[in-house]
Amino acid sequence: MKFKFFHVLILLFLCFGSFAQTGDWYNLDFESDGVLGISADKAYQQVSAAEIKPVIVAVIDDGVDIRHPDLAGKIWVNTAEIPDNGIDDDGNGYIDDVNGWNYLGNSSGENVKEETLEITRLYRSYKERFGDKTPEAVPKSDQKEYEKYLEYKSAYEQALAVVEEEFAQFAQLSAMYGGAYAYMTEKMGREDFNLDDLMEYKVEDPQEQEVINFLLMAETGGLSGYLEEGASYFESALEYNYNLDFNPRTIVNEAEAREKNTAYGNPMVWAADPDHGTHVAGIIAALRGNEMGVDGVASNAIIMPLRVVPAGDERDEDIALAIRYAADNGAKVINMSFGKSFSPNIELVEDAIRYAASKNVLMIHAAGNDAADNDRNRNYPDGSFGKGKSMSHWITVGASGPLADSSLIADFSNFGKRKVDVLAPGVQIESLVPDGGTKANSGTSMAAPVVSGMAALIWGLYPELSASELKMVILKSVESYRDTTVYSPYGPVGLKKIVRYPGVISAPRAIERAGR
């Protein structure tokens, strides 16, 4: 999911020292552990793991490292498909879809990684049509389309200007850090100094002390790591996301697939560095109690990876096909940690959402990370079809922090009295990354899978529940903080005024309510 990276980067850097909790704190309990987790560990003390039935959770994302050791035995297997034989054994139109599907590739094994944003694609398309025309030269029959061109042009230019401004600030901060490091390298006569060396260094003048203080704050706050991530982000944004001349979609074998009457893409659900999707999958389903990685929320969850989200905006047709695939192949929960501001083919996605509803599938969507009001600004898809609250089988999730104070809703989290249903932990969430590792990420992308994991856990205990019943079990069992005053772009406000069910989800309370 795209977001104002520089804003979140600086927020995390400045706030790092105030939140020292590490690991999978989303599992913890406020009363016993002092952080606003969902009390999953406590819930497992009250149920028998042997009684929890498996539940398939589709992760529509940038792919999943299905060989991560902390996901061993937790990846969905299509038993009707014979691996790597080049035949559609089960006749569903997908060749060798043993563990899911990748809609961002072709049958030769080539895969899309970087992509443009939807607004870039829209502006490019309309610019080709209207870019060389004056308003007077546009026929009346094309006037509405020309107005769309002007809208897209303005939106694209404004968004690009924001990124360029953020990049300038980032470059300044990066230069400060590089200059301070070079200064102390010269003073110490070596590059491999550490925190202890800095603290033990005998200061000779005030300037040295200022430089040391900056480096100490930077290293303890993790600035060097964030600068590395920032460099990658801005390279992707400026070279690919907003580049009007960049079009990687030619890689995807859509024309070939139409001729053969098969699905476009390939079965490589792990393709092109699936960092985000692996992190999401780990929150939902990482093995519990194995002293490795993290503990996922749902011991019974089976992950179905569906790769549709590149390093840019996902395409509506891919999302729609992935939702239908999940519903047709037994997924009961679909996690969607992505979103965008423009959706030119939203009707395809909405038809797929209705189809999933007919299959009794619960859909969990991240609210977005722009500190924006979703009641005023749509974050596609939102399950509302342009109306008020979302459909009965859809939950939109905002991100909560670890403390029951004004920071309860994360500074970056989108909100909305009608459109954001509930909060779940989404700040400094430790989970899995490819090649066997873990790291901490922040975002509503992390909050959504916490809810998806809890949904899978409850459904495993009470499989007779419908998707709409399960939704209400989750929402009506929140640990309420309705009267807590939190920060928002509107100033201090009661949580009840910006979140539909103003609280943090609770596994024990949800399990108790489901069993009534």
Image: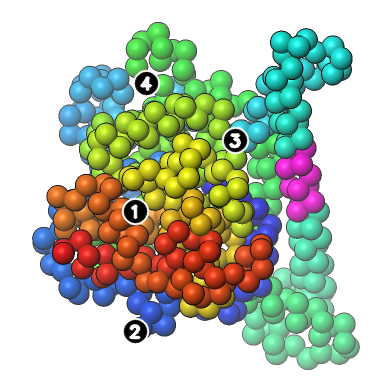
Horizontal relation, residue 132 to residue 77: left or right = right
Q: Is mark 1 on a helix, strand or loop?
A: helix
* Nearer to us: label 4 or label 2: 2
Q: Distance between the residues labelled 4 and 1?
A: 27 Å
**Nearer to me, 126 or 16:** 126
The residue positioned farthest toward the left in the image shown: 51
Q: Which of marks 2 and 3 is nearer the N terminus?
A: 2
Q: Residue tagged by mark 3?
A: 342
Q: Distance between the residues labelled 2 and 3?
A: 43 Å
Q: Is mark 3 on a helix, strand or loop?
A: loop
Q: Which of marks 3 and 1 is nearer the N terminus?
A: 3
**Magenta stretch contains residue 162:** yes
Q: Is disc 3 surrounded by few (<14), some (14 to 19) or many (20+) residues within 10 Å?
A: some
Q: Is disc 4 surrounded by few (<14), some (14 to 19) or many (20+) residues within 10 Å?
A: many
State if disc 1 and disc 4 touch (CB < 8 Å).
no
Q: State whether the magenta stretch is mostly helix, strand or loop.
A: helix
What colour scheme does the image use?
rainbow
Q: How far apart are marks 1 and 2 (CA)?
A: 24 Å
Q: Residue tagged by mark 4?
A: 263
The x, y position of residue 47, in whole percent, is: 16, 69
Amino acid residing under circle 2? Ser
Q: Residue tagged by mark 2?
A: 32
| Range covered by the magenta-colored residues | 157-167
Q: Earlier in the sequence, mark 1 or mark 2?
A: 2
Horizontal relation, residue 419 to residue 372: left or right = left
Q: In which quarter of the image is the C terminus?
A: bottom left
Q: Residue tagged by mark 1?
A: 452
Q: How far apart are marks 4 and 2 (CA)?
A: 50 Å
Q: Is disc 1 surrounded by few (<14), some (14 to 19) or many (20+) residues within 10 Å?
A: many
